[in-house]
Image: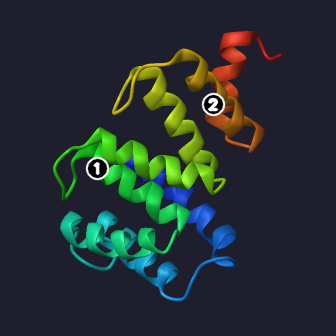
Amino acid sequence: MKYQVICLALALAAPIMAEETPAGALENYQLGMRHAQGEGVPRDDARAREYLEKSAAQRHAPAQYALGWLYHEGRGVAQDDRRAFALFEQAAQAGLAEAQYMLGVMVGQGWGVEKNSQASLAWIKRAADNGHVPARQVLDSLFGGQ
C-alpha cells in the first residue's frame, strides 16, 4: 500500500516535471514505473531499476525518487539506504516535495545517514512549504498547527 501511494504521488508529479525533462528521461521513467507496478507488463523490479537508472542519470527528479524507493526497500537491488538517501537528496534538491519529506524521515531515523533532528525538521518544513500534505500534518502534530 505504501508503494502504491508513492506511485500515485509520482504520477501526479510527472507532468509538472515534464516541461524540463531531457529527451528520453520521461519515457524511461514511465517504463520503469510500469515495470515497478506491473501495469500492462509483469512486475519486474530489476527492469524497473534499469529504466529508472537511465532516467535518473538524466536528472529526472521523479525517477531519482522512485529509484530511491527501490534501494530503500531492496526491490530489484540490494537494500542500500545510503544509495537511497543520495537519490532522494538529488530529487529533493530539484524541488520534489516527496523527496524532501523522505529526506526528513531518513535523517530523523538515521537511515543511510547520521541521525540529525534539526536537519530532519528542516527537510520536513521545506516539503510542507512545497505543498506536501503529510509533511504539513507532521508539523501540525508537532507544533499545533502554527
Work out whether mark 2 precedes mark 1 in sequence or the reverse, and give the earlier one. 1
Front in this rendered view, residue 57 or 24: 57
Front in this rendered view, residue 123 or 13: 123
* Residue 40, quarter of the rendered image: bottom left
Which residue is tagged 1? 71
Density class for disc 2 (Cα within 10 Å; few <14, some 14-19, many ≥20) is many
* Residue 128, quarter of the rendered image: top right
> Where is 23 relative to 117, above or below?
below
Point 23% across, 73% down: residue: 47
* Residue 122, quarter of the rendered image: top right
Residue 36 located left or right of residue 88: left
Say whether marks 2 and 1 touch (CB < 8 Å). Answer: no
Question: In what element is the residue under mark 1?
Answer: helix
Point 29% across, 69% down: residue: 48
Outermost residue, right side: 146
> Where is 1 relative to 136, above or below?
below
Question: For residue 20, which numbered disc appears in the image?
Answer: none
Front in this rendered view, residue 39 or 141: 141
Q: Amino acid at mark 2?
A: Ile
* Residue 1 in sight here: no
The image position of residue 129, as x and y in percent, is 77, 38
The image position of residue 1, as x and y in percent, is 37, 44
Residue 34 located left or right of residue 90: left
Which residue is tagged 2? 124
Q: Amino acid at mark 1?
A: Tyr
Residue 96 located left or right of residue 110: right
The image position of residue 34, as x and y in percent, is 36, 73
* Residue 24 in sight here: yes
